Amino acid sequence: GFVTALCCAPWLKLRPNNNNDIGAWPVRFLLFKLMFMSGVVKIQANCPTWLNLTALEYHFATQCLPGPLAFHAHQLHPFFLRLSVAATFVIEIPAAFLLIAPLASFRTVGAWLQIVLQLVIITTGNYTFFNLLTIALCLACFERGRD
């Protein structure tokens, strides 16, 4: 709530040349924190399935509300599933720093990585609107057109 109020602050819109994006930075930091902590908590849990990159070998068959492609994802070769876990770690931990990079092009790449991860998660599982909210946070990483 506070981040939203800060981003929509009326005093930011009163300037005649409103081409600063100071209101986007709290949202970018919130997205960074969400994704970074999503990756770090998997490592800190000391769960052998995450540490051995085998979590997806069980995940698709044991999740509460599997999506339409979950069965097919479960049938994939274990090497590809382990590669997917490694890619998840890369996108959630080091690539999360791209979301708060000073260069807009880095933030754009980081946002696209997060969006692709969320879309893959949407196709294999049902986490209601959580993935869509994460994608909405990614919008703050894209530069608006400058005049």
Image (tube, rainbow, N blue to C red):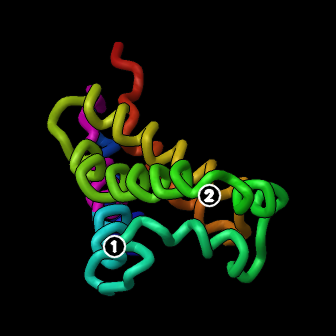
Residue 91 horizontal side relative to residue 55, left or right: left
- Residue 17 position, x and y percent, is 27, 26
Q: Which residues are magenta?
A: 16-32
Question: Mark 2 belongs to which amino acid?
Answer: Ile
Furthest toward the top, the residue is: 147
Question: What residue did someone put label 1 on?
Answer: 51
Residue 5 location (% of width, % of height): 38, 66
Where 123 sits versus 113, above or below? below
Q: Residue 80, position in %: x, y?
A: 54, 49
- Residue 38 in picture, x, y percent from top left: 38, 70
The residues tagged by marks 2 and 1 sit, at their Cα atoms, a distance apart of 20 Å
Q: Which mark is residue 121?
A: 2
Look at 62% across and 73% down and name the residue there.
59
- As drawn, the label of residue 93 is none
Judging depth in this view, the residue of 10 and 4 nearest the camera is 4
Residue occupying image coordinates x 35% and y 13%: 147
In the image, is residue 66 above or below residue 92?
A: below
